[in-house]
């Protein structure tokens, strides 16, 4: 399964992307995460549904991260993707 996420709240400048990439790699997920100009963080992650859920719960428990809102939708999988990376705008 692959999901596209958009996180709102105190999610930039608090180590969110680093935390997301380390969590995703630890769970064996693929995808990417990036800051957007509007102050949100955008992420695509791919893997088993239960691991995607675990990743979101881990991010919500981040020390300085304060997620006020989350949008999520299922999107088509990418079969050729390797690893999880931090993207720059």
Image: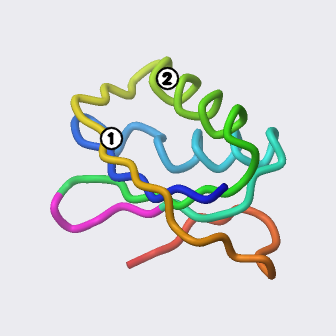
Residue at 51%, 50% (x, y): give it: 17
Q: Is the magenta stretch mostly helix, strand or loop?
A: loop
The secondary element bearing badge 1 is classed as loop
Q: Judge whether 74 appears above or below 69 on screen.
A: below
Q: Nearer the viewer, residue 69 or 86?
A: 69
Q: Residues within 10 Å of mark 2 (few under 14, many from 20)?
A: some
For residue 17, side relative to residue 77 (left or right): left
Q: Does the magenta stretch include residue 35?
A: yes
Residue at 44%, 63% (x, y): give it: 34
Q: How crowded is mark 1: few (under 14 residues within 10 Å), some or many (20 or more)?
A: many
For residue 59, side relative to residue 45 (left or right): left
Task: Identify residue for label 1.
Answer: 11
Give the color scheme: rainbow, by chain, secondary structure or one colour: rainbow
User: Looking at the image, do the residues carrying marks 2 and 1 touch, with CB atoms under 8 Å apart?
Assistant: no
Q: Which mark is residue 62?
A: 2
Q: Alpha carbon of mark 2 to alpha carbon of mark 1: how far? A: 10 Å
Residue at 70%, 46% (x, y): give it: 24
Q: Judge whether 46 appears above or below 52 on screen.
A: below
Question: Start and end of the magenta stretch?
Answer: 34-38
Quadrant of image for the C terminus: bottom left
Residue at 65%, 50% (x, y): give it: 21
- Where residue 73 sits: x, y (%)? 41, 54
For residue 85, side relative to residue 15 (left or right): right
In primary-sequence order, the first of circles 2 and 1 is 1
For residue 46, side relative to residue 68 (left or right): right
Q: Is residue 37 magenta?
A: yes
- Where residue 83 sits: x, y (%)? 79, 65
Q: Judge whether 52 appears above or below 21 on screen.
A: above
């Amino acid at each position: 399964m692959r999901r596209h996420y958009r996180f709102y709240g105190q999610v930039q400048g608090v180590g969110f992307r680093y935390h997301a990439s380390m969590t995703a790699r630890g769970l064996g997920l693929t995808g990417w995460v990036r800051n957007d100009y509007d102050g949100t963080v955008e992420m695509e992650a791919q893997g088993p549904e239960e691991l995607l859920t675990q990743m979101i719960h881990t991010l919500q428990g981040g020390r300085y991260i304060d997620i006020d809102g989350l949008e999520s939708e299922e999107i088509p999988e990418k079969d050729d993707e390797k690893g999880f990376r931090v993207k720059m705008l």
